[in-house]
Image (spheres, rainbow, N blue to C red):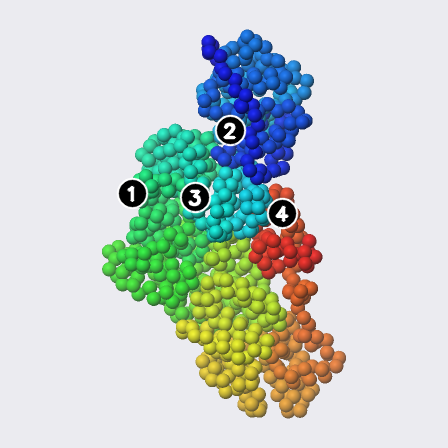
Amino acid sequence: MTVSLVRAPVLGAKFALPDPPPGLVRRQRLTGRLDRGIQGPLTLVTGAAGIGKTALVASWARSRASSSPVVWLSLDEQDTPQSFWAHAVEGLRRAGVPVGGDGGRGDGSDPGLPVRIAAALEELPAPLVLVLDGLDRVRGPAAASGLRFVVEHAGPAFRLVVIGRSEPALPLHRYRVEGRLAEIGGRELAFTRSEAARLLQTQGGRPPDERVVDLLLERTEGWAAGLRLCALAMARAGDPLEFAGSAAAARQAVSDYLLTEVLAVQPAASRELLLRAGVLGRVHPGLAAALTGRTDCEAVLHDLVRRHAFVEPVAGTRWFRVHPLFTAVLRGRLRSRQPALETLLHRRAARWYAAHCRTAEAVEEAAAGGEWPYAAAQAVRHLAVGPLLAGPAAAPPTAASPPTAAVPAASPAEALARMPEHTPGAAAALVAAACCLARDDVAGCRAGLPRAERELVHAPAAGPAELLTLELLRLLSAPGPAEADAAARRIAELVLLLPDEERARHPEIEPLCLYGRARALLCDGRIRAAREGLAEAVRACADGAPALLSRCLGRLALADAAAGALSAAEEHGTASLDAADRGGVPEENRSGAAWLALASVAVERGDLRTAAAHLDRAADHSDTLHDPVLAAERSALRAQLEVAGGRWHAALAVLDEPRPPGPPGAAARLAVAHAGAALAHGDHDTALTALRAVPEALPARTVLLAQAHLAAGQSAQALRLIERAEGSAEATLPDRVRLALLRAHCALLDGDEAAARDRLLHALDTARPELLRRPFAEAGPWLRHLAAGLNGHSSSYEWVTAAAPRAADGMPVEELSPREKEVLALVARMMSTEEVAAELRLSVNTVKTHMRGIFRKLGVSRRRDAVERARDLHVI
């Protein structure tokens, strides 16, 4: 330390505890950590601006005021090492620590002052805490150098708490190894869900909507100042939920703070890098160099991390991540200052990503830069359409380029969906058709394929990737097996022409082909072959394709249900939902096939309320509205529910709704449902008319014809039809049960009640393994009379009329697992997902998976509703 002739002034305000912010949230989990931390010599609290460092420690210090002395010292950019030591000495003296020397003044001009401070502290009879708020603002290394001596020689009663945006120049690595350092960083300081809810309540005066809490917590990532600023702005907004869902509103609320408190205080090199590279959200030193022309980008990025400037490293990589709100603010700043530069930066980034085999990011950045032909060409040339169709969570592993290998690839789906309609080129035409298919618009995809074919004919260098993409789209939108098989054969040939590394990057092609062929079989109404194909597709799905696996399982469950394999349908339907949950597939990208299958199972088993609930869940997914096979299944199930409720006219109205022409399987499904609804109403003529649209080879058609003839008194013709259907290898379990019931009815009409009972028992034995109840419910009054005469076999019929398990309010109950009950019990105590995870020693993702299972089983969509329903059912 240098000797100064000017004594440093001492300001009393430096020792005052900062006033608590309005609506301060007590954070017991962190104050407890501070209590434990000061059992050792040094506690470090670091984090970004506005993350709540000072508020936390001040609140903690205020609570300890009566138990042990806490000396608070606030520092700022005007402090020098000399003024720092002058204030440190004065603060210690006010706490009763006699620091001698320096003329009794202690203004920092004495080079031996740290030694005398340490000596005085060594004599402390009881613990004393010194809090240095903003030590990183003191200019020069001298303050940290002297402080290091004090920390290491002050004796066991001295406790030091340092607050700052960056770590002090102390040998922290050694302190960590020696166990002498307690740390609270940015991740710990981030607000949990329950803390965020309490903060928002203090601003609004009432408990906030759970969706508002979740949205703001997602946008701010628990940043205290961001939450507070958003809460204040939201109080002035008309609709809190609309505000919370608006990225622009959140950016506007925090913009001034981030520009003033974060960007403006950075060195010039850091500001330049943030404005150029930070607008991308994800930054690599090489990418930053391409955008800025600098050669020291890695050092600058690490300095930003050290300064807690809302930049953090991605573990195990050379990548860095910028806080999403800060990214949005940086983009706004760049647009206002240099509007043309942002486009140029995105285009440069696209080239850098393309050079490093990061196709998804290259597409994303090219789209952001308005280079749509380049974006489409990259997507097609590198087969990005495969991951697009396999699902957003199914991005393939990228080439092992050292700068990028460990960073997850982005999905180009959202970027490509914004492509202008008339973007020129074959690649753009293929991408447009693929986007239609990705949003379940099969007709739109089919309509766009001719344009793609014409463009490819004139393309100067159409390679195997372009042709393979065309065939893949043709396969996945094929209306029948013939076209699907031809496309699959062509794909197999084209795959062999791809480079080995390109094939390795796209494991989704094989399961997509299997899925496409099985889907075409479903379109054609060939249930048994479709089940076999879908089972093969499920086995081929890679671990990285949860969305595709979920879709395959959902369609398999639907085919199972159509075949009457209700247990398998239930198993595969549940597995489909679980695969989507485990893979984190967004709701908007999920298929409703599994819910349709579960609704079909419930209908066939007579659990109509559960069926209606599952059908409502299916309607939340776009494919049940746009995919012709799923849309037909949904309409047929709705009609069956109306028939079961005695509302025949409503059932027929559902089936008569206008719809575009569909594939044979969908048309047959609707016609069979139409005939069944007409027969339930006693309208034989309408039933016979509807059945004309059903292929003669379909056993269900023959069964319904026999039923119509029998109801019209034409037993002989009915028996001939029954015999024909019984010989069909395609007859499903419901078909076989109905045929046995028709035989029983014929025998009863002939006066042979014994034969009729035998046929009924055969039907019951056939249906019982799958608990198939619907054929019996629809058979008519004669069945009840016959069942009443079963005598010693009456128990064989009891399961048909048994009700499904229900709660007190009549809703069906699916039992929660022990772990789900534990999770829900903690949620009932208003604990956040992170707190539940910590309490049960689970990952946050695992807790989220359990919550999705709880929502599904209890038939709710919000945490509060789950807790209330569980309490009603006495689950917790």
Residue on which the image places disc 2: 164
Q: Say whether marks 2 and 1 touch (CB < 8 Å).
A: no
Q: Give the CA distance from mark 1 to mark 4.
A: 48 Å
Percent position (x, y) of residue 241? Answer: 50, 52
Percent position (x, y) of residue 481? Answer: 41, 70
Left or right: 120, with 310 as reference point? right
Rendered view: 531 above or below 677: above
Which mark, residue 444? none
Residue on which the image places disc 1: 340
Q: Is residue 123 visible?
A: yes
Percent position (x, y) of residue 618? Answer: 52, 64
Residue occupying image coordinates x 45% and y 59%: 511
Q: Say whether marks 3 and 4 touch (CB < 8 Å).
A: no
Q: Give the CA distance from mark 3 to mark 2.
A: 25 Å
Rendered view: 616 above or below 203: below
Residue type at tag 2: Gly
